[in-house]
Amino acid sequence: MTRAKFDEDARVKLTDCVRKIETTTDAELVLIVRGRSGSYAQADYLFGALLAFAALLFLLFSPFDFHQYWVAIDVALIFALGAFISSRSNWLRRLLTTEKFRATAVRTGAAAMFYEAGIANTAAEMGVLIYLSVLERQLEVIADRGILKGVNALEWNQLLFELHEGGRKADAPTLLAGMESLGALLSKHLPATGENPNELPDAPRFELK
């Protein structure tokens, strides 16, 4: 996954999509795309430690002679290098963490953002958060009570399953298609009444660092 997939062009298209949806429904949508939902320092340190251990074995059993003074320095430098490489690789961070850890990180991040972005404070309780975390390749949707009361539960759960599956790709086109499906469902069950002002920003938040 490269950041270029969530560039300015993607921002414009997703913003237009949110605006279009909100003309057909009373729901208030907020879209947030984050590079990751938690700290992966433990994965970085683990990769660094594995490389350092491999280097230590090489230094100890190599047929070449190394001065003892340099062994500790070399091992420390390789550990730092391994940690740095891991910190720049989503693939390594996924490889060195459990699915449960990543899922918990995304759910926790989404729940915190639901309140931080003010989605829980809409007047009619019509807020919906679409939260995509790129490193984990996971998408979460959190809806306020007004949405859950108004939308058919079976259709809602089926759409959530499709959105979660699409989130595994973690790219802008798939996210845009999912947003359009969500908009169609919301307009079907919660059509615009003209009584719901635009309380939340339409532009998505990209936090990719």
Image (cartoon, helix red, strand yellow):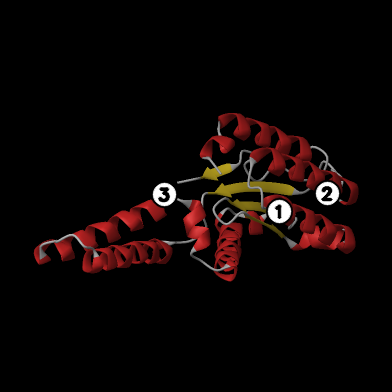
* Amino acid on which disc 1 is placed: Val
Q: Nearer the viewer, mark 3 or mark 2?
A: 3
Residue 173 drawn above or below residue 88: above
Judge left or right: residue 140 versus residue 98: right
Q: What amino acid type should be assigned to the residue bearing mark 3?
A: Arg
For the question of whether residue 146 can be seen, the reply is: yes
User: What's the residue type where badge 2 is placed?
Assistant: Leu
Q: Are marks 2 and 1 in contact (CB under 8 Å)?
A: yes
The answer to whether mark 3 and mark 1 are in CB contact below 8 A is no
In the rendered image, which residue does mark 3 sit on? 88
Q: Which label is found at residue 186?
A: 2
Q: Is residue 195 visible?
A: no
- Disc 1: CA contacts within 10 A as few (<14), some (14-19) or many (>=20): many
Q: Which badge, 3 or 2, is on the more N-terminal residue?
A: 3
Residue 128 is marked as 1
**Quick check: 75 above or below 32?**
below
User: In terms of sequence position, does the residue under pointer 3 or pointer 1 come before the other?
Assistant: 3
Q: CA distance from mark 3 to mark 2?
A: 38 Å
Q: Nearer the viewer, mark 3 or mark 1?
A: 3
Query: Percent position (x, y) of residue 155?
Result: 88, 58
Which numbered tag is attached to residue 14?
none
